Image (cartoon, rainbow, N blue to C red):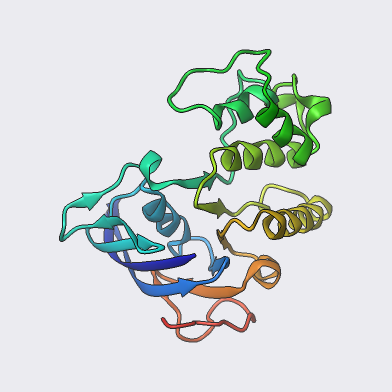
Amino acid sequence: MRLEVDIRKTLRAGGRTFGLRLNFSAGGSRLVILGPSGSGKSLTLQAIAGLLRPDSGYIRLDGRTLFDSGRGIDLRPQARQIAYLFQDYALFPHLNVAQNIAFGLHAGWRNPSPRESSAELEHWLDLFQLRAVARQLPDELSGGQRQRVALARALAAKPQALLLDEPFAALDQRLRGQMRTELDALQRRLGIPLLLITHDPEDARVFGEQVLELCDGELAQDPCCSGVTLDMGST
C-alpha cells in the first residue's frame, strides 16, 4: 500500500476552530496513526474514506487519486474500494450475523434474506468462527463477536485497504489482547493493507510497521504523547 496525503481542513463549532494540516507519504502493509483524543485521527481516517471532504489538497492510494481539490476529484466512499471499521462497529441491529456479513457481498442497499446462504458467506462465517451465531442479532453477541462480524462484513467486499478506527477501545483488557492477536494473524494471512488509528501505544507496537503521531491536527516531529519510537518514513 502506498498512501499519499496532503490535505487541509478547518472545522468550526461553538466558537472553537480546529485545523487539520497533514502532509505525508507512507508505504507498507501496516500503518498506525497514534495520538490522543482530539488530535485529528478520526478526521484523517474519514477524509481518506471519503466521509469528510478536505478544504484543499489531495489523497492518493497506490497511485489512484481519491481526492484532489485542484482537479475536482472527490470519489464517493463506495468508489474508493476501502473498508472502514467504525469504533462502535456500526452493525445493522435488525439483521442477524449472516445478513450483516452478506451485506458486504452485495452491491447496493438491499437487505439480505434472513436465511441468506452462499459458499462465500460460509467462507467468512468459518474464517471468523461465527457459524454457531450466524442467526443471532448483534445485541445477542459478545464484544469480540461483534468485532468479528464487522471485520467479516468489511473484508467480504474485497477492499484494497482496511481502515480501523480505535478497533480495541470498546473491549476490556483481556479481550483487547485476544483480538489484537486475532487481527494480527488475520492480516498476515489475507495480506490486506491496513491503516489503524489509536491512542494506545500497544496497538502501535503490535501493528506499527510504520507509525505516525498526530498532535493538534499535525504530524509530530518528536513524540508528544507516548513513549513509542516513531518511524516517520519519508514524511
Residue nearer the viewer, 81 or 133: 81
Q: Position of residue 10 (x, y in %)?
A: 26, 60
Q: Position of residue 48 (x, y in %)?
A: 39, 55
Q: How many marks?
A: 0
The residue at the point 70 percent across, 36 percent down is 124
Residue nearer the viewer, 40 or 6: 6
The residue at the point 51 percent across, 74 percent down is 212
Asked if residue 220 lies left or right of residue 158, the reply is left
Indicate whether 211 appears above or below 8. below
**Can the viewer see residue 118?**
yes
Asked if residue 3 lies left or right of residue 203, the reply is left
Please, which residue is most extreme toward the bottom here? 222
The residue at the point 63 percent across, 51 percent down is 167
Residue nearer the viewer, 122 or 72: 122
Indicate whether 167 appears above or below 113. below
The residue at the point 55 percent across, 82 percent down is 231
Image quadrant in which you'd find residue 93:
top right
Indicate whether 53 appears above or below 204. above
Residue nearer the viewer, 11 or 85: 85
